[in-house]
Image (spheres, rainbow, N blue to C red):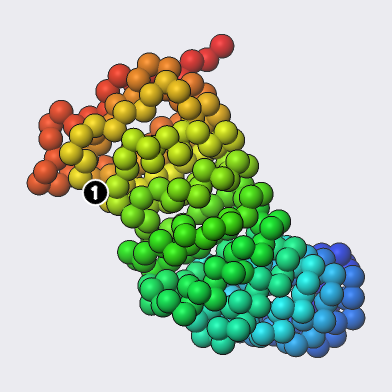
Amino acid sequence: MVAAVISKDSHASIRKTQIRKLPMQIKELCSLRTLDVSHTQISELPPQVFELGHLIKLDLRSTKIRKLSVKIVRLQKLQHLLVGGDTTFSLIKYPLSFTAALGDLACMRVLTITCSFQQCADEAYQDAWLPSVKKWRRLESLTIHCGLGSSMEFLGSTSDPPKKLQKLKITSGRFVSVPQRIKRLEHLSFLQITICKLAADELKILRDLPKLKSLVLGLEFIPREERVFESEGFNELLEFSVECPVPWLTFMQGAMPKLECLQLKLCSGPEARRDSVPSNMQPPKYN
């Protein structure tokens, strides 16, 4: 049955099947470039998978795999490592040397992982994680699903973020403020972060990102003054989603000139003001 599903050397997918185990013969697919075992009952990968030297994409989302073999660092051409959904890829379960060794996967372009609150707070884990991030020069997409309320300050402190990054998505974790080094990401088109304050200079970091098309912003604070979105900046932004307890936002005429979708997710609180509503919103203009 597995052989019938895996029919091509270049691409093998058993996605959304009830298969529980991959055969050892998979190593015979020596030219395999994509292996998709997502949404299956598989709980571990046979060691033969790590002999697939041409593998570019490995999709393990929503499987029963709880730990990857350290042999994954042998996949030197790997560009896409997708782990998430119901699968918990806990790097803290590995030796710290393995976490740092992930940086040797220099071709990595797309990475999705899940981290617990404890992992994000562990300094030893942070120290092992940051060097890997610096080595991923080709990284284009990084998604991290964090434990609720996790501090992600350590990630914002990296001195040399991947300059080719186009997508940065951090769920459930939060930063104190907009990381200053985000302004170096000139190719960033999608950004999802949660912050605990938003000063005018931090808002400028976001609005000056030249290729930003989609912004998902969580604001975990009660604003003491309005946040003004000026007519300058956000020139390419198409989608803007903001979640905050008080919607004290002002959009000046001409702000976000290409905006097509604005989503406000609001939750009322004791400090909310009746006049704390978006104002001066200039709707998108259509030809």
Q: Picture coordinates of residue 161 (x, y %)?
A: 58, 55
Question: In this image, 111 relative to 181: left or right?
Answer: right
Q: Residue 116's image quarter?
A: bottom left
Residue found 79% across the figure and 85% down from its top: 48
Q: Picture coordinates of residue 219 (x, y %)?
A: 31, 47
Q: Nearer the viewer, residue 53 or 138?
A: 138
Amino acid bearing label 1: Phe
User: In the current view of this chain or complex, which residue is farthest to the top?
Assistant: 287
Dot 1: few (<14), some (14–19), or many (≥20) neighbours within 10 Å?
A: few
Question: In this image, 32 relative to 278: left or right?
Answer: right
**Location of mark 1 (residue):** 221
Residue found 31% across the figure and 28% down from its top: 228
Secondary structure under tag 1 reads loop
Q: Residue 130's image quarter?
A: bottom right
Q: Picture coordinates of residue 269 (x, y %)?
A: 14, 47
Question: In this image, 50 relative to 65: left or right?
Answer: right
Residue found 84% across the figure and 75% down from its top: 53
Q: Residue 240's image quarter?
A: top left
Residue found 77% across the figure and 79% down from its top: 74
Is there any visible trace of residue 250 in the rendered image?
yes
User: In the current view of this chain or complex, which residue is farthest to the left?
Assistant: 270
Q: Nearer the viewer, residue 71 or 199?
A: 199
Q: Nearer the viewer, residue 146 or 265?
A: 146
Residue 26 against residue 114 in the figure, above or below: below
